[in-house]
Image (cartoon, rainbow, N blue to C red):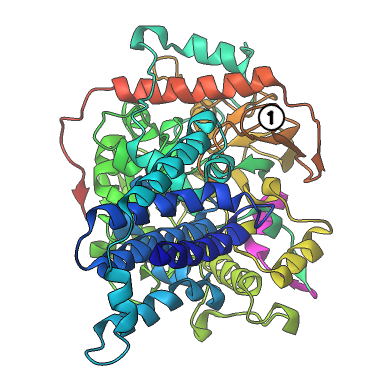
Amino acid sequence: MQPILFFSFIMLLKSALAWMVIFENGMSWTLLLKELPFALIIFCFIEVFAKKRKILYYLLANLLMTTILFAVIMYYKYYGVIVTYFALAQVNQVTAVKNSVFSLMDPYFLLIFVDVVILAALLIKKKGDIDWKMKVNRPSSRKVALAVLTVSLIVCLFNIVPNRASMNEIVKAEQMGILNYEAYMIFSSKETEYVEPNEISQQKINDIKKIIPVEQPFQFGTAAGKNVIMIQMESFQNFLVNLSVDGQEITPNFNKLVNEHFYFNKFYQQVGQGNTSDAEYVVNTSLYIPPRGAATQMYADRELPSLPKLLEEHQYDTATFHTNVVEFWNRGELYESLGFNNYYDTEYFGEEDTVFFGASDDVLYRKTLDKLVEMDAAENPFYAHVISMTAHHPYTLPEDKQYITLPERFQKTLVGDYLVAQHYADQALGAFIDDMKEKGLWDNSLIVLYGDHLGLPIYSLNSNELALMEEMYGREYTYTDMINIPLVIINEGVTEPKVFEQTAGQVDITPTIANLLGISMENQLHFGQDIFNQYENLLPQRYYLPTGSFLTSEELFLSGSGYSDGKHFSLSGTSTESGTATEDEFQRALELLQLSDSYVNSLPLKDGEKPSSK
């Protein structure tokens, strides 16, 4: 039984490393009861059933569990969630952002593989050091191994079964143990409980959200007949607005838009595993992301109600612009489902001035402008969705795009690189705005700008970087701040500068644009609301925050095992033991997610013309 003790001790140390990185309370003596039994089950199986080459099986089992723990650590550092087999199935997408992922790796994470390397080297030696191999391969007491196996299995079940109902995925993994949680997620047969299609209606959604109808909506039709240009800004968080560092304005062009037009400062992301592509999905459908996976991969086979389809009914031409390949995150299928007439990807933008995954924002805006001028010359108005990308994690721009020099304390930090990247993106945006004005597009277009998702995850920052964030905020950097992105709406010739304080999210963009254009959404189911005319909101969150988390007009509620052990954060960022978010709101947020999942699941599979690549 010596090999079992040795390898179990090794796995216990590795589990302790993972717990230290992931869980708020760090390492705990409960590791013995939550992680060790799983390893014992695997090793006891080897002792009972392996008659030859036991050392090889031990090493393979050790390598498999080590790889799982390493994947959990790295995925948490990037996404802030516990990776599952389903997310790892999307590894082809993760490898595309490998530079982002590995930029978050602390060198000590690699200690988790030290024993694997040493033992593998010893195993393949042809001479010497073979006594330990012979000892490992000796048969052991099957009765003892079976007894340990039985007890370990009982302990694992004791960890798993009572905690299946936990809402917060991180809490669930801590309650079960990481390896138990991964096994549970593989073998769990729990299916989503869908609501019958005939029970889903706009009235029901409005009732759950407590939307109050407005007879004469504010801003209704003020942009009627105008082009719509929507600019999705990579990793753009709200704290950048009017931010200066030692007298240097980080986003001067965006600040000018904020100060001269409509600005929503309590606007929040609602994306999931698909990140940027999820933002494209949410803002164009007014639906929530799926319970797991990226919307582009889970929902792109459906006939989705969308903003492009709604506008096409009113004689709009539609197109979307992104400098990456359209296959990334299955965007080609998504664009077809959304009903875009055309998309423009790498094939159009080329490889000129490539940064990260495609042509730079300078190239994006310059070549997009050429097409917008063409579309504007046509008889009908157009809707263009423009996706920026250069300010992408890990924000390591080439020197010729680093237009500002930050103080030394920001040098060689993720925070500093982020600010430099966003300053470049802002300069490119400013040039695009000037060009639109010069070409006559500005005055005749409704222009919407928003951040796609967070750029500086709390769990990715070291203590020095968190101190820099606290310096800029003037207080601790919190989850509320992390998911807060800006929204600016420009309706030239109509709007006066105004800051709107109501809470809103990406799901609200489509109904808000429809109101401005004077287009009814009565016949298109949507989960967002027109934020010019609704002042209370309920915004369910998924993925980046645990299931069951939601935003209200006053605070962010972060779920625990359920409602009772959840945490409350005011929208100003302070944390309190109790807050205004109620259990009723908690249940209604979950109901909204279930209705959205059920509705999309009930939609017919798509069967129509594909948009053409340009």
Say which residue appears at 71% left-offset and 40% top-offset: 496
Does 123 sit left or right of 593 as displayed? left
Helix, strand or loop: magenta stretch: helix
Residue 553 location, x and y as percent? 72, 30
Say which residue appears at 26% left-offset and 47% top-offset: 342
Q: Nearer the viewer, residue 285 or 575?
A: 575
Residue 422 location, x and y as percent? 59, 67
Check the image and report above or below for 130 versus 330.
below
Q: Is residue 247 magenta?
A: yes
Q: Hey, what amino acid is under mark 1? A: Thr
Residue 542 location, x and y as percent? 52, 38
Q: Is residue 323 visible?
A: no
Q: Quadrant of residue 241?
A: bottom right
Q: Which region of the structure is painted magenta?
A: 246-260
Q: Quadrant of residue 370?
A: bottom left
Say which residue appears at 66% left-offset and 38% top-offset: 495
Q: Residue furthest top?
A: 198
Q: Nearer the viewer, residue 528 or 447?
A: 528
Check the image and report above or below for 44 versus 209.
below
Q: Quadrant of residue 94?
A: bottom left
Check the image and report above or below for 50 versus 385.
below
Residue 39 location, x and y as percent? 42, 54
Q: Which residue is mark 1?
A: 552
Q: In what element is the residue under mark 1?
A: loop
Does 313 sit left or right of 597 as displayed? left
Q: Residue furthest bottom?
A: 127
Say which residue appears at 52% left-offset and 79% top-offset: 401
